[in-house]
Image (cartoon, rainbow, N blue to C red):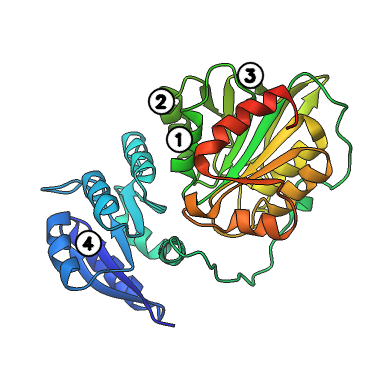
Amino acid sequence: MKPIKVMIVDDSAVVRQVLSAMLAEHPGIEVIGVAVDPLFALEKMQRQWPDVLVLDVEMPRMDGITFLKKLMAERPTPVVICSTLTEAGAQTTLQALAEGAVGIVSKPKLGLKQFLHDAADELVQAIQSAARANLRRLAPQAAVKLSADAILPATGQAMAQTTETLVAIGTSTGGTQALEAILTRLPRVCPGLVIVQHMPERFTAAFAERLNRLCQIEVLEARNGDRVMSGRALIAPGGRHMLLTRSGAQYQVEVRDGPPVSRHRPSVDVLFRSTARAAGGNALGIIMTGMGDDGARGLKEMREAGARTLAQDEDSCVVFGMPKEALKLGAVERVLPLGEIPVAILASMAGRR
């Protein structure tokens, strides 16, 4: 296989030097250039276009967000954001994700050189995932994965039909943009939503805050015991699993620690299995854009428990991985383009169609 061609755009000479040397040691990656800012990068990219850009946010002459918008409008290219993690920086990085970045690697202000060495594996994985982000055929992953059994046994039965419905959504690569497209179109009166978006710890709170400002509905990073209710979306916190539980006829979430499931924490499989057990036919399950197969088995369990199930269609996915795997398992009732999913969510309040 040809190596992944990478360009590094960062105004820090230390970052450019360390990342270049670090990535040069990986046989599957070729650093074809570095640039101190986006304008220099564009000059070099005209001569040789990279497969993946590793991009800083705060740079002279043109900031990373502006460059990202320009890139996605003119020639979409997989971008991994490598930025300093501060509260304000987290908001900026989330904006980058909303504009089309497919990965993030956080870097501290202090101890940068050592951190970059320690984070080598994380960056390599982010680059490899980004390089596949626009492909429809995903490379198989052979490593052993834990199933949702590690968090919640596959036993139990949901209660009978109730008047309160809810929606469980699972997504990964490309999901930040897709979720924004859906949630901003929902009115205040809509089913309660529980959402797993694969995202690093400490980023989900800022992501939820950003959506809360944009949406009519309330969007929160989930806390243990939060109630699922109409007009509210709860997003699983990065680094922890989120389960749906039932208290009488009402639903709430449990946020707990545990090992990664399907290589993720939070895991869509965990959320979907708990939803199958707690809500059964009172739920709508939606699996959306993302790499890998997290959520496919859980969605099947939801369907077997009587829930309605949807998948985002291939044309509107950044990566048609998770929906594709769910379709293979027979977990999906209907496949819809992204633009039709809000209508389907609202229709679920009126019962099964």
Mark 2 residue type:
Leu
Check residue 230 in the rendering and tell me which mark sits there, or answer none.
3
Classify mark 1: residues with Cα within 10 Å, few (<14), some (14-19) or many (20+): some
Sort mark 3 into few (<14), some (14-19) or many (20+) by Cα contacts within 10 Å.
some
Q: Quadrant of the C terminus?
A: top right
> Residue 98: image x %, image y %?
38, 41
Q: Position of residue 62 (x, y in %)?
A: 15, 47
- Inter-mark Cα distance, 2 to 4: 37 Å
Q: Secondary structure at mark 1?
A: helix
Per the image, the residue denoted by label 2 is 214
- Residue labelled with disc 4: 14
Dot placed on the residue nearer the N-terminal end, 1 or 2: 1
How far apart are the alpha carbons under marks 1 and 3?
18 Å
Height in image: 86 above or below 109?
above
Identified by mark 1, the residue type is Glu
What amino acid type should be assigned to the residue bearing mark 3?
Ser
Rendered view: 288 above or below 142? above
Q: Answer whether residue 223 is visible to the viewer in this image.
A: no
